Image: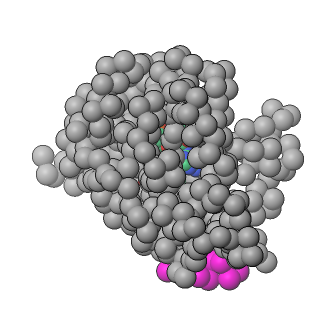
Amino acid sequence: MIKILQKTQCCGCQACANACPKGCISMQPDEEGFLYPKVDEAACVNCGLCEKVCPILHKPSTYSVLETYAAKHMSNETKLKSSSGGIFTALAEIILKEGGVVFGASFDENWNVVHAYVKNLEDLDKLRRSKYVQSDIGKTYQQAKQFLEQGRAVLFTGTPCQIAGLRNYLGKEYEKLLTAELFCHGVPSPAVWQKFLTQDTQKGKISAIDFRHKHFGWDASFLKISYQDGSSIPQAPHYLLPLLSKGQGFLFRRLYRLRFWISNLYERPACHQCHFKGLDKMANFSMGDLWGVRETYPQQYDVNGLSALLVNTLKAQGLCEKLALEKTPVDLQKVVKYNPYLLTSVKPHPKRKEFFRRYQTENFNSLVRELLKIGPTWMILCRTILSKVAHKLHVVKRK
Ligand SMILES: Cc1cc2nc3c(=O)[nH]c(=O)nc-3n(C[C@H](O)[C@H](O)[C@H](O)COP(=O)(O)OP(=O)(O)OC[C@H]3O[C@@H](n4cnc5c(N)ncnc54)[C@H](O)[C@@H]3O)c2cc1C
């Protein structure tokens, strides 16, 4: 019977709950809002399947990176609708066109992040774009298995631990299964997300949420919340929007609220000791942002979005040419250099415990600004401009 003795030993993938033949494992939120398995001991028959499928106890076989690309979707419109370069859409298009099913993270009616599937291109937008919150896998492993058993092609996307959980749950290779994992920094708490939404927005009237809005371009994206009446809250200082054009927004990155969601203040404990870091991959494809491209491959830079794509299996290699992607081979080491969390777990913020002690009763924004030491806007602007000037002078001196 699965027992979580240490929080760092459960990534919340839900393979155990999906596998339990008696359905006696439910996922319950802890005080930080992360889901953990809870076994109904009276109904448990001690079959041991929950432990067998746990990817932390039994890591699935891994794949090695065969090819590495700078890649982006051929359609500009798709790039703008995606968080990075639109690799996910290119993969999904192939599967949907052959009558398959695509799984990924979407929002439910209360803006919780949940895994779901789509069967046609018209619905694909639900799964597009990064949601910086741990997604609830629900019963999607069981659903994926049903489709595979019916002979349908399935693309399953998610974090590396979710792909590992799926593969353990399935227990065998399926010819028609394609997997794609994100480069994953770590997943923030669903309860903190709900606290932010309840306190900071008119939640009932939200029509769209984009964690990575590309008004200023891909590498300066910010959290934007749109409302049914047509208004929106760009989570960046409003007066900056008309002042800047695409490609200039990076100057003000430190002001954007996206920062809150990648601050390590409220990530899942297991993300700080992640079992899936490194270049041994869980999925056929790995996809992330090609950070550092202005330094490493400046000619590849695309203000509308650019991805790093790792091709990890022969199956993935076989598909590569069919994808609607523009791609150029790049050096894996250069990708890793600017995406260090591919190899190492993020460290918890020193104020993480304090955050969780105070977040239920205090104003979310003030608390985060205090703990992250985010000063007044004018000070951040001055500091950012000064550091940019210093960087430019340094580059000129080196030349
Ligand atoms: C929590 C999180 C952390 C990340 N950390 C990094 C990082 O450190 N470095 C980096 O380069 N890239 C990171 N990414 C990946 C990056 O943001 C893009 O998601 C990725 O490059 C795919 O972009 P795309 O343009 O191809 O497709 P898009 O259409 O933008 O992405 C959609 C894909 O993301 C998946 N997805 C979205 N939200 C979630 C979620 N909460 N849980 C599981 N799957 C989700 C969808 O299922 C779909 O497969 C992270 C993404 C998430 C969600």
Q: Give the magenta-colored segment's residue range.
A: 350-358
Q: Position of residue 327 (x, y in %)?
A: 30, 26
Q: Quadrant of residue 124?
A: top right
Q: Position of residue 116 (x, y in %)?
A: 66, 40
Residue appearing at x 38%, y 61% in the figure: 59
Q: Tell me the quadrant of the picture where the N terminus can be found.
A: bottom right
Check if residue 288 falls in the magenta segment. no
Name the chief secondary structure element in magenta.
Answer: helix
Work out whether 79 lies above or below 331.
above
Work out whether 106 lies above or below 374.
above
Residue 309 versus residue 114: which sits nearer the camera? 114
Residue appearing at x 31%, y 20% in the figure: 321
Q: Quadrant of residue 60?
A: bottom left
Work out whether 139 lies above or below 46.
above
Q: Position of residue 222 (x, y in %)?
A: 57, 46
Q: How is the image coloured?
A: one colour
Work out whether 164 lies above or below 234.
below
Residue 327 appears in the figure: no
Q: Quadrant of residue 391?
A: bottom left
